């Protein structure tokens, strides 16, 4: 069978459905091809279910701390794992169903289920169906990458996908990789009652962050009883279901961390290896990320790549922004670009780590005249009143231009408060815009002006 569309979107993750909607509204006949679950990683096995679980873990944590607030709840807290999963699944499934309904109601858009492969730049195959089109928009995302550790072929392990199907509470979860996935799952499972060990190759957690950020995150996790093994080299896996071990062979002395379950959180790779990109002539880098220009165009006329698969971002908001860029250029005559994007993300441990722009290290490396302001959360009224004073806020300003270069807020509600700095950075306004703004009392953002009034040249 053969079908013809004006445009084909491959992947119904964070960029694809929104672009399909715009193209359909513009009168184009559009196919969206999805091989698995509509909504992609974020909705089904990523942001949405993990943040739902983080919320359960937070409640468990605060319930244990209830008496700090003068509330007695009768002693031991029991986490009913099956109910946590039911709640999580419910939230994720409703989100997926909403996207499915949205797609089904889009004018001029057809959802085709199956795995798409290029046969030529303007021809794709999905099973027995050949699809001819003028334009292809790839939004194929990525998946967990598991290094070729000795033992990985015989020792059972989980990735973020398997974590969603777990039905029992691990007695001891051993996590390889101490970054977003490892730290978010690590803290939540510790709060659910599991023993948690994290094995990380780098000498410090989150090595891309400034050292005091890494140190504060280590402190937060260790206070909750998470065991960290940093600088772990030459990892091997051993054992069988229910009794597994992660070994760091090159360490002196050699390390062995035994547990009941292993979670691999060692990064992701793009889903571009089974897409037939060679048949279309689409170029990738050596890791398989599709090479794109500043407006998500590949090297082949009529083919675009958006989201995690182009390697220009690894977040839901960057994937969605890629859609906005493509739509603006194609449909609105507005030349939006990836390079206009300011790096921003949050690590959703509790308290969260929110980041925008450059770290202090990056700002110094780039030759800026760096000024830094720091304020511990223990000196932020709202954090004191809430009894959640871990962490600090740090702002980085260019002393020549008076512009904000970056910020980190490791602290309660930092993931929200940081947007008042991010928006000023997008506006390219001087940092004094923030110091002159009157913020609401008592909030976390209220102390951002004060932090900016304490700028000085960093000592180290
Ligand atoms: C555990 C976890 C937690 C996360 N938490 C956050 C968070 O809190 N905040 C945040 O911003 N980001 C988070 N992320 C990252 C976020 O999920 C991704 O950046 C985002 O989903 C990328 O969207 P995408 O559209 O590029 O790809 P995806 O969401 O991966 O969608 C790609 C889609 O393409 C389909 N597909 C692939 N190949 C084909 C093919 N050949 N034919 C047909 N269909 C195909 C896939 O089935 C999938 O549905 C998290 C990720 C993980 C794993
Ligand atoms: N809050 C969020 O926005 C959020 C949450 C979860 C995931 N994500 C996305 O998912 C992606 C994947 O997250 P991730 O944490 O798996 O990957 P990552 O690439 O961020 O980190 C991988 C970690 O594993 C370590 N590692 C790699 N190889 C190792 C080895 N051989 N031995 C020991 N340690 C090793 C690395 O040093 C690193 O710390 C991220 O890029 C992120 O964008 C985002």
Image (cartoon, grey):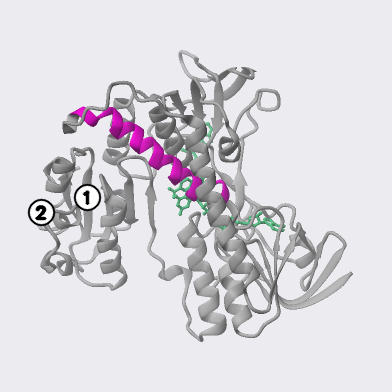
Q: Is residue 329 left or right of residue 62?
A: right
Whether residue 170 is visible here, answered yes or no, is yes
Image spot of residue 368 (x, y percent): 26, 60
| Mark 1 crowd level (few <14, some 14–19, many ≥20, 10 Å Cα) | many
State the SS at label 2. loop
Image spot of residue 307 (x, y percent): 55, 61
Residue at image position (25%, 56%) is 417
Q: Which residue is mark 1?
A: 394
Q: Quadrant of residue 52?
A: top left
Decide: marks 2, 1 in contact (CB < 8 A)?
no
Whether residue 291 is visible here, answered yes or no, is no
The one of 74 and 109 positioned closer to us in this rendering: 74
Image spot of residue 213 (x, y percent): 29, 41
Residue at image position (76%, 58%) is 114
Q: Compared to 281, does 412 lie above or below?
A: above
Q: Quadrant of residue 151?
A: top right
The one of 6 and 427 positioned closer to us in this rendering: 6
Residue at image position (44%, 23%) is 194
Q: Is residue 54 left or right of residue 390?
A: right
Work out which quarter of the rendered image holds the N terminus and state it.
bottom right
Q: Is residue 308 left or right of residue 458?
A: right
455 inside magenta stretch: no
Mark 2 vs 1, N-terminal side: 1
Mark 2–mark 1 Cα distance, whole angstroms, equals 10 Å
Q: Please provide the residue range marked out in magenta.
A: 44-67
Work out which quarter of the rendered image holds the C terminus and state it.
top left
60 inside magenta stretch: yes
Q: Which residue is mark 2?
A: 454
In the current view of this chain or complex, which residue is farthest to the top?
A: 253
């Amino acid at each position: 069978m053969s079908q013809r569309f004006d445009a084909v979107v491959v992947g119904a993750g964070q960029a694809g459905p929104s672009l399909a909607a715009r193209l359909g509204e513009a009168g184009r006949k559009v196919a969206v091809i999805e091989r698995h679950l509509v909504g992609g990683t974020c909705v089904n096995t990523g942001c949405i279910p993990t943040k739902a679980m983080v919320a359960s873990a937070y409640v468990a944590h605060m319930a244990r701390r209830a008496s700090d607030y003068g509330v007695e709840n009768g002693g031991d807290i029991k986490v009913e794992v099956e109910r946590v999963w039911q709640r999580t699944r419910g939230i994720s499934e409703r989100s997926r169903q909403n996207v499915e309904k949205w797609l089904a109601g889009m004018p001029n858009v057809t959802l085709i289920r199956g795995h798409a492969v290029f046969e030529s730049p303007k021809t794709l195959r999905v099973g027995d169906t050949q699809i001819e089109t003028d334009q292809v928009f790839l939004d194929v995302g990525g998946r967990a990458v598991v290094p070729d550790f000795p033992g990985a072929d015989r020792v059972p392990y989980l990735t973020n996908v398997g974590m969603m199907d777990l039905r029992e509470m691990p007695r001891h979860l051993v996590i390889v990789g101490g970054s977003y996935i490892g730290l978010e799952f690590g803290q939540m499972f510790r709060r659910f009652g599991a023993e948690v060990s994290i094995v990380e190759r780098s000498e410090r957690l989150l090595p891309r962050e400034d050292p005091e950020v890494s140190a504060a995150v280590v402190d937060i996790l260790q206070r909750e009883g998470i065991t960290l093994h940093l600088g772990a080299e030459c990892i091997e896996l051993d054992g069988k279901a229910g009794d597994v071990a992660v070994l760091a062979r090159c360490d002196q002395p050699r390390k062995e961390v035994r547990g009941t379950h292993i979670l691999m959180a060692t990064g992701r790779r793009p889903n571009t290896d089974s897409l037939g990109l060679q048949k279309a002539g689409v170029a990738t880098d050596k890791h398989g990320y599709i090479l794109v220009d500043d407006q998500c165009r590949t090297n082949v006329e009529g083919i675009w790549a958006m989201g995690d698969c182009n390697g220009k971002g690894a977040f839901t908001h960057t994937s969605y922004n890629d859609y906005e860029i493509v739509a603006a250029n194609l449909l609105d005559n507005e030349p939006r670009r990836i390079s206009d994007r300011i790096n921003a993300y949050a690590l959703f441990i509790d308290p969260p780590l929110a980041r925008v722009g450059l770290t202090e290290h990056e700002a110094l490396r780039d030759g800026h005249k760096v000024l830094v302001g720091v304020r511990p959360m223990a000196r932020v009224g709202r954090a004191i009143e809430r009894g959640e004073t871990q962490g600090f806020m740090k702002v980085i300003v260019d002393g020549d231009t008076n512009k904000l270069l970056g910020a980190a807020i490791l602290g309660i509600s930092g993931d929200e408060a940081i947007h008042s700095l991010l928006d000023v950075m997008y506006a390219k306004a001087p940092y004094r815009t923030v110091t002159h703004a009157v913020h609401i009392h008592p909030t976390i953002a209220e102390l951002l002006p004060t932090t900016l009034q304490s700028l000085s040249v960093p000592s180290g």
